[in-house]
Image (cartoon, rainbow, N blue to C red):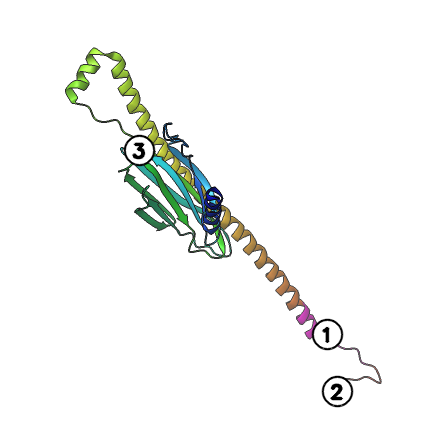
């Protein structure tokens, strides 16, 4: 009886939830097994419906640095407001940072291990969807070692020196990848803006051309009626 009541309660909680949520990685079913952390960085685009909310969870250790960037690429529908609200919460549910703009970033150091919640709300548009490009994840920097010990390792052990240099290169490549994603976000937003302006100019030019042609036809018709002289007969003569 108890399992049935517990299952019914879970179904009710799932139905009551108003915001669609997605986890970037599953939790481990057993406490003895290691927790599957999944990927440490993600970049993709999503569509948020009018007045909707999208949430994601990203696992991070206590000694990491979390970054979260977003940019609204385009709007679809009647409303054209590109502002969205972004929030970040700790695994305990406490609010870390907020951002409400067309594009923004939320960066912070992770103080506890667990799943951090990221949410995007399309609360400004009640009649239009927005496409948002996301770039979030976590990275870990190696702890700084004593300078003398570092020099000794570089002198005495070539493998340690190569390993340290490789880590530095990987860290630099990671930051270059982040800046590349920022450029991708801006590029796609500019592309959709140019496409929207192109369609707007084409439709507006076509409408104006049709209006000009229609007004010319009407002017010609009324001018022709002004110079239209009725034929006169013995029974039908113009009045004075």
Q: Mark 2 and mark 1 in contact (Cβ < 8 Å)?
A: no
In the rendered image, the quadrant that contains the C terminus is: bottom right
Q: Disc 1 or 3, which lies upstream in sequence?
A: 3
Q: Mark 3 and mark 1 in contact (Cβ < 8 Å)?
A: no
Look at the image and give the residue range highlighted in magenta. Answer: 221-232
Residue 239 disc label: 2
Q: Position of residue 143 (x, y in %)?
A: 23, 27
Say which residue appears at 46% left-offset and 51% top-offset. 16
In terms of image quadrants, where is residue 35?
top left
Q: Check residue 152 for magenta coloring.
A: no
Image-based side of 34 in relation to 220, left or right? left
Inter-mark Cα distance, 1 to 3: 90 Å
In terms of image quadrants, where is residue 161?
top left
Q: Is residue 86 above or below residue 167?
A: below
In terms of image quadrants, where is residue 164?
top left
Residue position marked by numbered label 3 in the rendering: 61
Q: Which residue is at the far bottom? A: 240
Inter-mark Cα distance, 1 to 2: 16 Å
Helix or strand or loop: what does disc 2 sit on? Answer: loop
């Amino acid at each position: 009886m108890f399992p049935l009541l517990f299952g019914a309660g879970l179904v009710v909680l799932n139905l009551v939830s108003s915001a669609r949520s997605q986890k970037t990685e599953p939790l481990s079913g057993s406490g003895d097994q290691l927790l599957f952390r999944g990927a440490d960085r993600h970049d993709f685009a999503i569509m948020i419906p009018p007045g909707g909310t999208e949430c994601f969870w990203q696992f991070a250790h206590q000694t990491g640095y979390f970054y979260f960037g977003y940019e609204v690429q385009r709007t679809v529908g009647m409303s054209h407001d590109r502002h969205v609200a972004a929030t970040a919460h700790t695994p305990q549910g406490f609010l870390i940072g907020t951002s409400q703009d067309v594009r923004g970033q939320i960066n912070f150091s992770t103080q506890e291990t667990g799943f951090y919640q990221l949410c995007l709300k399309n609360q400004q548009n009640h009649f239009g969807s927005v496409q948002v490009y996301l770039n979030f994840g976590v990275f870990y920097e190696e702890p700084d070692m004593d300078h003398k010990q570092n020099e000794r390792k570089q002198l005495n052990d070539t493998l340690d020196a190569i390993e340290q240099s490789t880590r530095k290169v990987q860290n630099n490549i990671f930051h270059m990848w982040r800046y590349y994603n920022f450029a991708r976000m801006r590029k796609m937003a500019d592309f959709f803006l140019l496409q929207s302006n192109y369609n707007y100019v084409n439709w507006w030019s076509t409408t104006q051309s049709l209006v000009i042609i229609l007004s010319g036809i009407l002017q010609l018709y009324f001018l022709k009626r002004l110079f239209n002289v009725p034929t006169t007969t013995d029974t039908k003569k113009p009045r004075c």
